Amino acid sequence: MNVRPPSVRYPHSFYDVFTIVVTAVVVAAIVLSVAYGTVIRIEMAVLLTVVFAWAAWAITKILAQETAPGKTKPYK
């Protein structure tokens, strides 16, 4: 069975986006359950904001690849 790891730089499926967002949410939940403080909460909020901004960019890129003529993919 050939399973590839999710790609951050060249996402080409919603599997990539879902895996990275879920991983970031789990990491933030673990950190917030272990260390509780104002600075930690701000750092986790910034991390999740960056991850969700990346997810919006990745989904836009995936949809643009699907509608582009020729459908050339930057990966092999």
Image: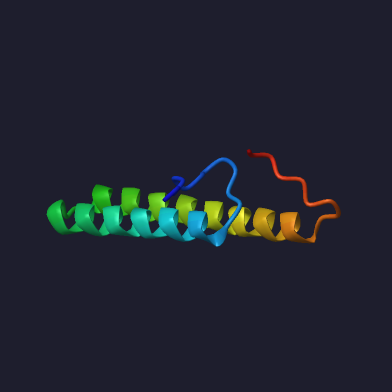
Q: Residue at x 39, y 49 (%)?
A: 47
Of the 4 image quadrants, the one containing the C terminus is: top right
Vertically, is 6 above or below 13? above
Residue 4 x, y percent position in the rendering: 46, 46
Q: Is residue 10 left or right of residue 40?
A: right
Looking at the image, the residue that sits furthest to the front is 1
Q: Is residue 42 left or right of residue 61?
A: left
Q: Is residue 17 left or right of residue 36?
A: right
Residue 32 x, y percent position in the rendering: 21, 56
Residue nearest the observer in this picture, 47 or 21: 21
Looking at the image, the residue that sits furthest to the left is 34
Coloring basis for residues: rainbow
Q: How many marks?
A: 0
Residue 51 x, y percent position in the rendering: 46, 52
Q: Residue at x 62, y 53 (%)?
A: 57
Residue 71 x, y percent position in the rendering: 78, 52
Q: Residue at x 50, y 54 (%)?
A: 16
Residue 36: quarter of image:
bottom left
Residue nearest the observer in this picture, 67 or 36: 67
Looking at the image, the residue that sits furthest to the right is 69
